[in-house]
Image (tube, rainbow, N blue to C red):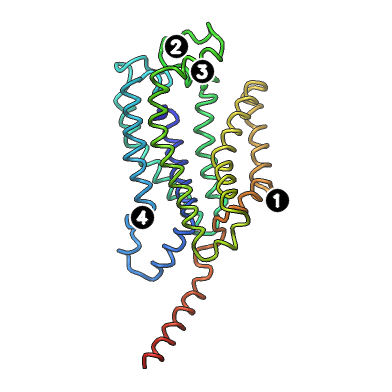
Amino acid sequence: MIQIQAALFWAYAVGATFALAAGRQLQVWERINAGEGPRTRSRAANPYLALTLLFAAVLMVPTGLFVLWQNPSWATMHVADGHGGVWAGFVLLYAGGIPVGAVLGFLAAQVLVLVGAGYWAYLQCVGGYFLLFATLVHGWDGSGYERFLSPGARDWADWPQDSVVNNALDFLTSGTFLALLVFGAAVIGTMLITEIGWLMEGWSLPGADEDRKVHRVLAVAIAAAGVHGLPFLGAVTASALVRLLGGWLGLPLFAVLAGVVLLPRRSPVRRLYGLVGVPHRHWRVGLDDTATTTAGVSGVTSDRSG
């Protein structure tokens, strides 16, 4: 349901966010399967990966293909003005690339969560959503938001003749926006419910209360702002810097600002991330203790049985 140029970035970001939201469950999954045979440790047996792939294939792909068929001009950011201008490879890229992108994002974030680098898994989400919003806000030529808010080829061609407000109002009253509203309620609603549900499921597991520093409602709000709000703000900032200073100066300056905000150990983003309760340790931490406790309980049970 998003324009082709931004679709793969969104798919990667969704996959990474799903893995981060289920980070504690993924660690438990690894602990359960520790020492088991290859059949149990198959990636295909991972229910969270399977559900991520199902979300991408059943919701993201069909809605995107519908919008591409209904309005090929808008779906290609007006690179094509009709069905005849849509290269078949675009359709193949959309239909096959979205599930692949979601799986790649999930696996990348999962690896980082399992090795105890949860914050870097979070940065996978930030990077994917930043590229998504940067494409929609700025695009490749500075006209990203204009292309997004132009429902048809004629509207895109006539954009300079009217104000941004009027063009935006025309978009909000168009059939394209109505389709996005309906599909968005299904796709984005399911996405948010899944992310929140997996977060809350993880908070019910052992050790979660020690990691989560705030109330669940506030933790969800912080997570949403960090995953969705911060990348959008970054995309708007990057676009503004490029427009004011040019690409050669604006992009390096934005990279420095982003590094200062995201990378230092005492950065505000890291501190907020630490409040949410996403695991920050290697999945093997506590495994020996768990095994010892289990063995001790089994021994006591055997003695009592005897």
Q: Earlier in the sequence, mark 4 or mark 2?
A: 4
Mark 4 in CB contact with mark 2 (< 8 angstroms): no
Q: Which residue has dot 4 on it?
A: 47
Q: CA distance from mark 1 to mark 3?
A: 38 Å
Residue 288 in percent (x, y) is at: 50, 75
Q: Is residue 114 positioned above or below 273 on the image?
A: below
Q: In the rendering, which numbered label is found on residue 266?
A: 1
Q: In the rendering, which numbered label is found on residue 64?
A: none
Q: Which residue has dot 3 on it?
A: 146
Mark 1 in CB contact with mark 2 (< 8 angstroms): no
Q: Earlier in the sequence, mark 1 or mark 3?
A: 3
Closer to the observer: label 4 or label 1?
4
Q: Secondary structure at mark 3?
A: helix
Residue in the foreground of this view, choosing between 76 and 166: 166
Question: What type is the residue that disc 1 sits on?
Answer: Arg
Which residue occupies 33% across, 59% down? 42
Q: CA distance from mark 3 to mark 2?
A: 10 Å
Q: Is residue 95 positioned above or below 47 on the image?
A: above
Q: Secondary structure at mark 4?
A: helix
Q: CA distance from mark 1 to mark 2?
A: 47 Å
